[in-house]
Each structure stands twice: as structure tokens, then as C-alpha cells.
Amino acid sequence: MCNQTDFSSVKSYVLRGGRMTDAQKKAYGDLYPLWTARPNEGSVFNFNAVFGNSNPVVIEIGFGNGDATILIAKAFPNINYLAIEVFKSGIGKLLWRIDKEGVPNIRIVEGDAKYIIENHVEEGSAGGFHIFFPDPWPKKKHHKRRLLRRPFTGLLSSRLSSGSYIYFVTDWEHYAFSALEELSLTPGLKNSFSGFAPPSSWRPQTKFEKKAFRENRGVKELFFRKL
Ligand SMILES: C[S@@+](CC[C@H](N)C(=O)[O-])C[C@H]1O[C@@H](n2cnc3c(N)ncnc32)[C@H](O)[C@@H]1O
């Protein structure tokens, strides 16, 4: 787990324990060296070395159990996915699925995405960011813990290569509108749509989306590109 810096001094997550099954524990032990990328202190990732090819690298922040990650990576084998999460049980689940289902284009990074992106992702090197159903932090006093706020959106913008994207999805209306404003006010980004984006056909539903539908909460999507 990486340390904290300015960007990550306000945490956007609460560390959940979660019980690991024996399969997840075994996956965590045996498969961790194979399918994780571990940054060296003081240096940025060499994505070509991490993935063994020069395909574009899309970074997912907070993959949960990795349900969307694995399906997207299978659907787009010529794109690499750097999947960042702090939740150990989710990491164990995704490690197990990567190995069992033979999906070579995912690498997991364990730690706070804010710290990792700030310290270990080179400027202009990312092909995109996926942020699906981030923790909503609905209480006003907690809004500062939301992931999609400036100056963090500026950091994301600086890491994107020209023309690449930020794709954000939430089922919390207040978060959706504030993220729209934050991204619109971030230098270097342009909304690809007027306001919210239409639903994409390729993003698989996760349990959070299904729960939102059951609870009659609509889902809102944002798609911004780096100028
Ligand atoms: C509500 S869950 C959504 C999971 C997944 N994206 C989905 O749609 O099923 C949000 C996840 O983001 C992770 N998360 C929040 N802030 C993070 C950060 N700064 N770095 C890494 N993971 C983070 C949490 O641990 C949690 O698993």
C-alpha cells in the first residue's frame, strides 16, 4: 500500500475488511506477483514493460470486485487496463478471475489512486480513465471526499494523452451534477456531449447499477476528452 501525499490527504474511501474466501486468499498470495504492477518509489510506470506491449493504457479507479473491468478487458484485447483499488477482497477476486479466465491485458495496482496517479503515472501517458460508481459521499460535510473534484480532475487531465478520455458514471444525482461542473471547469478537458452522455453500449452493468435501478435512482454518465 502506498503512502499519502497532498492529493490523497483527504481519503475518497473507507477501508473495508470484507471476508476473503480461501480461493481469494490463495489468489492474493499466488497470483499477486503475476498480475499486479508495483511502482518503484520515485519513478513512473513504464507501461510497455508492465504490459509487454505498446497498446494504450486505460486506468480504472476503484474497480470494486472488477466485474466491469474483466468484461471490458475481454471485449477490448488491444487496450491495456491498469486497475487501481484499495479493497483487498476485491483485489483477490479480480486476481482470481484474471488468472482463471486468462485475461492478459489487466494489471492491478493496490493503493490510493490519487497517490499512484500523482506519483507513478507519467504526464500524457494515459489513454483514458474509467470511474464507475465511485463512493457517493452524499452528506454535504463529506463532499470533499468525492473523487471527482478539482484539483484532482486537473491531475487526471495532465496524465491523459491528447484525445483520450475520462468516463464517469454515477447513480447519485447530486454527484453527477457536481462532477459535470468540476470537469467542465478543469483546464484541458472538453465535454464530448452537451451535458450528460448517452449510455454507452459497451459498459457492463455492475451490482451498483442494478441496485440503483431497484431503488429507482437513474444513472448519469459523463464523457470528457483531453484537448
Ligand atoms: C462504490 S464502489 C464501485 C466499484 C466498481 N467501480 C463498480 O462499479 O462496481 C467504489 C470503489 O472505489 C474504491 N476507491 C475509492 N476511492 C479510491 C481510491 N482513492 N483509490 C483506489 N480505490 C478507491 C473503493 O474501495 C470501492 O471499492
Image: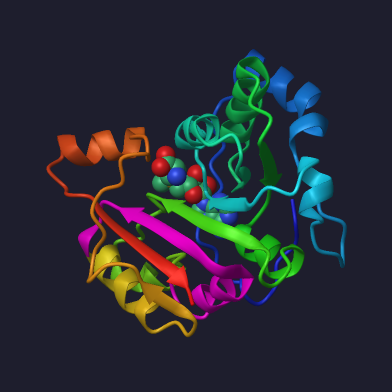
- Give percent across and percent down for residue 134: 41, 53
Q: Residue 134 versus residue 97: which sits nearer the camera? A: 97
Front one among 175 and 12:
175
Residue depicted at 42% across the width and 66% down the height:
146
Q: Is residue 105 above or below residue 31?
A: below
- Name the image colouring: rainbow
Q: Residue at x 61, y 64 (%)?
A: 114
- Residue 178: x and y in percent read 30, 73
The residue positioned 81% from the left and 41% from the top of the image is: 52
Q: Is residue 88 magenta?
A: no
Q: Position of residue 191 (x, y in %)?
A: 34, 72
Q: Is residue 168 magenta?
A: yes
Q: Residue 95: percent from the left, percent from the top?
A: 66, 28
Q: Is residue 163 left or right of residue 183?
A: right
Task: Give the farthest residue toward the left.
Answer: 216
Q: For the magenta stretch, what is the residue range?
A: 149-173
- Residue closer to the observer: 3 or 199: 199
